Amino acid sequence: MSPAGHMRPRAIVGLVKGLARAVAVSVAIATLHAADPTAPELAQALQRKYDSIKDFSADFVHAYAGGVLRKQITERGHLLIKKPGKMRWEYKSPEEKLFVSDGVKMYSYVPQDKQVIVSTVPPGDRAATPMLFLAGRGNLTRDFTPSLVDAPSGTAAGLRALKLVPKTEQQDFDWLTLVVDPASLAIRGLVTVDAQGGTSSFSFTNLQENVGLADKEFVFKIPRGVDVVTDAPHQ
């Protein structure tokens, strides 16, 4: 008897659903290859692909320019994402920084400052920040109005840029742009502008999807001897 013969009904249903998602993603990719997609088509295909991803890891380069101080900086690090809402942004150069979300709390730690800022992750399933979007919060077709724009300078040839304007006003961003590989629907970059007019550009390499990340990767232990600042919610 085949292994499937020993599967419980619930497991069989899960397998069928998984196959259905895979088929939907394959159809979406095939459709994109057939012709240049419109912005809504690309957004729909990207959402279907992203729904099939449970976790991923990547190396990143974060370039920031502008803002009140008109500064410019380029940083590098490693990223872990696990849905729903778990993130680990580990900056390695030029300065070590760590941002960890366990889905309920966000911990921001800069060792040089000897301070940890603890904030509450907004409830609900909407992307209150661009980073939460990557962690599975928000929906491209429900929450945003998409449009195709020119890819940022320095972007590799063949990549497409999808600008997303939130349908309801967001405190932390006016819009974000996803840089997408149309061949695989992998997100290769993210661009956003903050309230001070500064532009943050993230590029992602060595992307690995559905690697089975453990929850312990998203547990933050407050180091000894640091100040802890709590970002209390507004009443």
Image: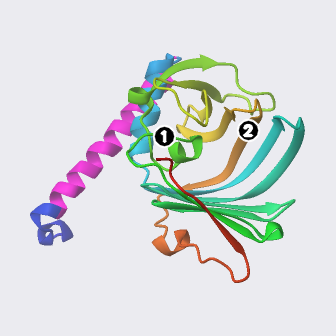
Q: Position of residue 43 (x, y in %)?
A: 47, 27
Does residue 32 belong to the magenta stretch? yes
Q: With respect to residue 182, does 207 lie above or below?
A: below
**Residue in the foreground of this view, choosing between 18 and 1:** 18
Quarter that holds the N terminus: bottom left
In the image, what residue occupies the spot 83% across and 36% down? 65
What amino acid is at disc 1?
Answer: Ala
Q: With respect to residue 20, does 223 lie above or below?
A: below
Q: Give the farthest residue toward the front.
A: 235
Q: Where is residue 145 in the image (x, y as percent from the top left)?
A: 48, 20
The image quarter in which residue 73 lies = top right
Label 2 vs label 1, nearer the camera? 1
Q: Position of residue 162 (x, y in %)?
A: 58, 25
Q: Where is residue 203 in the image (x, y as percent from the top left)?
A: 71, 43
Q: Is residue 66 left or right of residue 178?
A: right
Q: Is residue 32 left or right of residue 19?
A: right
Q: Which residue is identified by label 1?
A: 127
Over which residues does the magenta segment extend? 11-35
Instruction: Please tell me whether mark 1 sits on a helix, a strand or a loop.
Output: loop
Q: Which residue is identified by label 2?
A: 201
**Residue in the foreground of this view, choosing between 51 and 6:** 51
- Callout 1 crowding tier (Cα within 10 Å): few <14, some 14–19, many ≥20: many
